[in-house]
Amino acid sequence: MRNYEITFIVDPVLSDDEIKSTAQTYVDQLKKEDCNIIHLDEMGLRQLAYPIKKRNSGVYYCVEFESETGVVIDKVELSLRRDERIMRFLTVSLDKYGVKYNQDKRDGKIGKVKKKEKPVEEVSDRRSRPKRRNAPTPRPKVEQEVKATPTPPVVEEEVAVAAPAPVVETTTPDDFKKIEGIGPKIAGLLVDAEILTFAQLAETPVEKVKEILAAAGSRYAIHDPSTWGKQAKMAAAGDWDALKKWQDELDGGKEVKASSEEE
């Protein structure tokens, strides 16, 4: 069995019931795909590292599960990407050390600090004087013995240390509007799909980009992204002159096929 962990952020503007229903949707999807749910961690409302979809906070969930092959990952990520209630998500494959860390954390072996017990101190003000030989017996004096009130033993306190919030990458998205054929709306779809830079767009298969457009609706599915990867590669390399020259030969971001007339 392979171990995985999916962390996702739910839009905080939803009601409590809608937020819990959103998380349960993906737990049920994993169970339907014969995955074994190890633990569902409801991490609650947390501050975001940077605004996402005009939100400064989000409700975090983390699902740890087992799967035979891991094929389910692509299906779940596609559902998360299409779900407008999900702001961001991250899938991680766990090795044996990651699995043990999570288990120890749940068992309370990690993330707690113990205070050392302070020793009990006693203060004595008893004084004694040696007797002198052949000296008259002195008049007995009443000596006062002062003892400090014993300090009660310190009870060990366990202070729970809050787990750090998942680190969200703060990469500033590139201006995809410099790619001919991409407007503000499509640029937003690419960013929502975790494609943030020209280099990432250049490495993304055309079929993957078509899936993102199709998931957004028919008005976006009609666009042809066949040249976007090559344009993005030039932009990532900073070859703006070559990009501008090629864009002059394109028609709305599509290559123009040359036609010949037979005489």
Image (tube, helix red, strand yellow):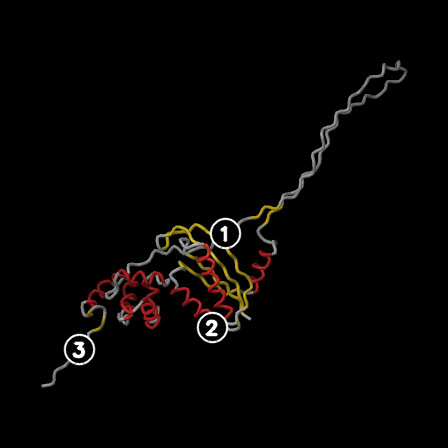
Which residue is under mark 3? Answer: 258
Q: CA distance from mark 1 to mark 3?
A: 58 Å
Q: CA distance from mark 2 to mark 3?
A: 43 Å
Q: Is residue 138 left or right of residue 38?
A: right
Disc 1 secondary structure class = loop
Q: Earlier in the sequence, mark 2 or mark 3?
A: 2
The residue lying toward the viewer, choosing from 161 and 232, is 161
Disc 2 secondary structure class = loop
Q: Is residue 11 left or right of residue 239?
A: right
Q: Earlier in the sequence, mark 1 or mark 2?
A: 2
Using the image, determine if residue 48 lies above or below residue 185: above
Q: Residue furthest right?
A: 134
Using the image, determine if residue 191 lies above or below residue 132: below
Which residue is under mark 1? Answer: 164
Circle count: 3
- On the image, the x and y values in percent for residue 93 come to 50, 65
Which residue is under mark 2? Answer: 71
Q: Mark 2 and mark 1 in contact (Cβ < 8 Å)?
A: no
Residue 91, disc: none
- On the image, the x and y values in percent for residue 207 come to 34, 73
